[in-house]
Amino acid sequence: MAGGEETAAAAEAEMDLEFSRGADVPSFEFAFNSEKFSDKVLQVEVVAGDDGGGGPLPDSVRHIKGQAMSGTQILTVKALHINSAILAARSPFFLKLFSNGMKESDQMRPRIRIANSEQIALMEVLSYMYSGKLTTAEPTLLLDILMVADKFEVISCLRRCSQLLTNLPMTTESALLCIDHPCSTSLAAEVQHVISVAKEFLADKHKDFDKFRRELMNISLAGMEAIFSSTDMHVSCEDDLYYFMLEWVRARYLDSEERRGILSSRLLPLVRFSHMTCTTLEKILACTDNDIDHEQVTKRITEVLLHKAYPRQMESALSTQTGWQFAERAYKYKPVKLVAFDRPCPQVTVYLDLTREECSRLFGSEHICSHPFQLGGRDFYLVAFCEMDEQSNLCTFGLCLVEWKNMKGSSDLTIDIEFAARTRLSGKFVSNLEVKVIFSLSDWVHGSVDLFGVPWSTFISDDNLFINGVLHLRADLRLAVGQMGLQS
């Protein structure tokens, strides 16, 4: 018996595949809901809401479920003329339904149950089982049909819906419908493909975070996961995404326990803590917000700080941890590694790594800004750029230290600057600039427009500077001795 079922299942799967591909498979459209060509009457119980379970209902269970005390209201019972051989050939569900030893009263009038919202989709699925055709290309209805085809194991219809959905122009609304309606059929790889396409569409459309920030407030949780999982998102810095997640979850989930659970299990694992600014990491560690699982977040941040301090030692320890291996996004402000000291005088050492590709994009008008960092209680950032000399038309690589905001009334700040780059030959950082500068209200940018003293073409092709395609820069910044009253 088992061998016979396996043979039948294999034949059915092969026929379904041909059916979904539009192959020359016999059509029985003329027999749909026709009393002449039918041997049974399918009783379709339509219930309120989404309480359609789908399975065949024995008399005793049907009687109990039909009572008001069960909470399930049967709105109507529809009778459809069916050909059991056609339905059984197209669906393992109906094959089992017609051969599971039903009582004599049910043999000629088998019953299934659906939700009120599934009526139109069910008729489309039943019609498809006869004809191999769908009468709609509307995304919402196709998704409804796909779900009903999944419930009743009509694999060929499920595949056809998946093909149509993949080929249709995607919109935010249709993409969200796709990812918010997961399919349960284990064989439906095509459905997973549709969901993957929808996720890619959402991530690509919303990759400009600042442009779509307001629209993102109306995106569902599944959509948020698809978008924030992407490494192609263009955003100023990872800090912005973290604070946006807090804003979004507080607006959509009013229950504190649910909100905390969503943040911990679904959203915070998407945050690239390793690319956040040290200032924000410190604020998160110090906050007492009940929405955040502080044990979870503290563990993640501790790992990040240890990895930044001891990258080689922590590499193997963290490589197997889920959620750790997150690539850098397309940040407007480039993440940096930072070491800060208070004594003998406030100073910071900033490490900025640029790929050759990133440097190549500087040729023209682009520039790269680092994450902001603090020195002497004031905010600074590094800027890498390509400088062109108007007289010689020669281009060079430049690096400057820029004060973020010099508020009116702020005192002048004297800083010792040293810019250095690691070289392949020595394996160490070699100083290219040492200078003492004064930052004031009118003088807030200092550095070098020609850090390496060579034309751009020589710089960009120098494999002694680009170690495995990466330029490693270091900025040592120290407050001049004698500047009192400044906070580090």
Image (cartoon, rainbow, N blue to C red):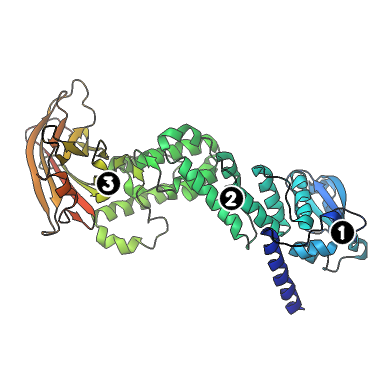
For residue 363, above or below residue 315: above
Where is mark 1, residue-wise? 60
Query: Which residue does the image show at 7% across and 36% down from the upper left?
Result: 436
Q: Quick check: can you spot residue 377?
A: no
Asked which quadrant contains residue 316, the reply is bottom left
Q: Position of residue 466 (x, y in %)?
A: 19, 54
Q: Nearer the viewer, residue 11 or 274?
A: 11
Looking at marks 1 and 3 on the same chain, the residue that comes earlier in the sequence is marked by: 1
Asked which quadrant contains residue 141, the reply is top right
The amino acid beneath tag 1 is: Ser
Q: Position of residue 302 (x, y in %)?
A: 32, 52
Label 3 Cα crowd, 10 Å radius (few <14 / some 14-19 / many 20+): some
Q: CA distance from mark 1 to mark 3?
A: 71 Å
Q: Secondary structure at mark 3?
A: helix
Q: Are marks 2 and 3 in contact (CB under 8 Å)?
A: no
Q: Quick check: can you spot residue 270?
A: yes
Q: CA distance from mark 2 to mark 1?
A: 43 Å
Badge number at residue 166 = 2
**Relative to 446, is 330 on the left or the right?**
right
Q: Position of residue 345 (x, y in %)?
A: 11, 40
Q: Position of residue 391 (x, y in %)?
A: 11, 32
